[in-house]
Image (cartoon, rainbow, N blue to C red):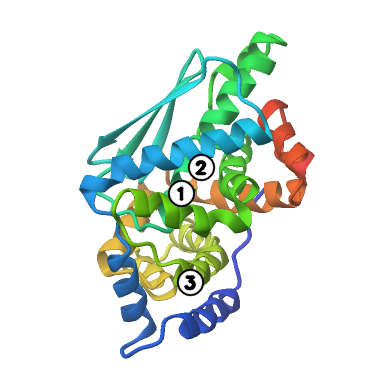
Amino acid sequence: MRPDPVPEERFAAAHEQLEAALPGNGSLATRYRAWADAQEVPAEKLLAATKAFARVLRQRTESFVGLPEGETVDFDEVANEPWTAFNYYLGGRHSRVALNTDEPVDALFLPMLVAHEAYPGHHTEHVWKEATLVDGEGYLEETIFLVGTPQAVVSEGIAMVALEVTLGDETDEIADRVFSDVGFAYDVETSRAVREFRDALSGLQVNAARMLHIDGSPEGEVVEYVERWGLRSRERAASAVAFLVHPTWRAYASCYASGLELCRRFVEGDIERFRRLLTEQFTTRDLE
């Protein structure tokens, strides 16, 4: 599927909704960045909070969709990478999830990141497909993962809906408890509004990628576009655009937005349909 541009009216509406959730002086971008900075998880607490969320999400995943026997995930920290986190599936029901310490992580994003990379996202998909499709059915093609293909669209879609199908409306309550245990104050009320804002902006990277690779816009102009609509600092906007010009990842941005659209529509809140995504072999056409 070819990703279509997202109407900027959607971004503008998201800005208007966020205004009410972030009262105070200064521009919306200034207030938003101040809130995100205040909610940034301290580096010394990041790994502990990540592992705590993994325990909660693993328990919920096992209860909802089950897990193959013997699966494990290790978390560690890295630097100098173009992404925030990455799942390295090592086979044998084992993953290594790397967290990029160069990229600040705010408290709202961390549970989504853990769900995306581990439970019930990439790790859970890999272990179940190894168990059911490779070991069970002999589909050796499932032992490889091809970047920038329809397979990646489906996999990223699974990971993008992972948090909402496992925690749903309980997300903020659970996040508040987890962060309290590691000594960090989580802003429950504002986080709900910011989550809706970020969800509405899920297609921003697609628009930016189209500007770069289809329209031929200068990179600096695209950075300004991401800075404006994403309410990001110049540095964070430039980092987002760097991902879009990276030789490996330049076409990958659409996998997130397109995958989210396809998998959210397919699941529609039904945990059994989500379990099918984890255990069966789907193409993007199957989900359209």
Q: Report, in whole angstroms, how far the alpha carbon at label 3 lies from the one at label 2.
A: 21 Å
Residues packed near mark 1 inside 10 Å, few (<14), some (14 to 19) or many (20 plus): many
User: Mark on residue 115?
Assistant: 2
Residue closest to the eye, 41 or 217: 41
Q: Quadrant of residue 257?
A: bottom right
Task: Report if the CB atoms under discs 2 and 1 are less than 8 Å apart.
Answer: yes
Q: Report, in whole angstroms, how far the alpha carbon at label 2 lies from the one at label 1.
A: 6 Å
Residue 200 picture location, percent across and down: 57, 67
Left or right position of 55 against 134: left
Q: Is residue 123 above or below residue 183?
A: above
Q: Is residue 244 above or below residue 276?
A: below
Q: Is residue 188 visible?
A: yes
Q: Is residue 3 visible?
A: no
- Residue under pointer 3: 189
Task: Identify the residue at horizontal 61%, vertical 30% (top origin).
Answer: 62
Task: Identify the residue at horizontal 35%, vertical 46% (top origin).
Answer: 84
Q: Quadrant of residue 108?
A: bottom left
Q: Counting residues from the N terminus, which is met first, the one under dot 3 or under dot 2?
A: 2
Q: Is residue 147 above or below residue 223?
A: above
Residue 55 picture location, percent across and down: 46, 35
Residue type pointed to by label 3: Glu
Task: Report if the CB atoms under discs 3 and 2 are less than 8 Å apart.
Answer: no
Residues packed near mark 2 inside 10 Å, few (<14), some (14 to 19) or many (20 plus): many
Task: Identify the residue at horizontal 69%, vertical 51% (top origin).
Answer: 264
- Residue under pointer 1: 111
Residue closest to the eye, 251 or 187: 187
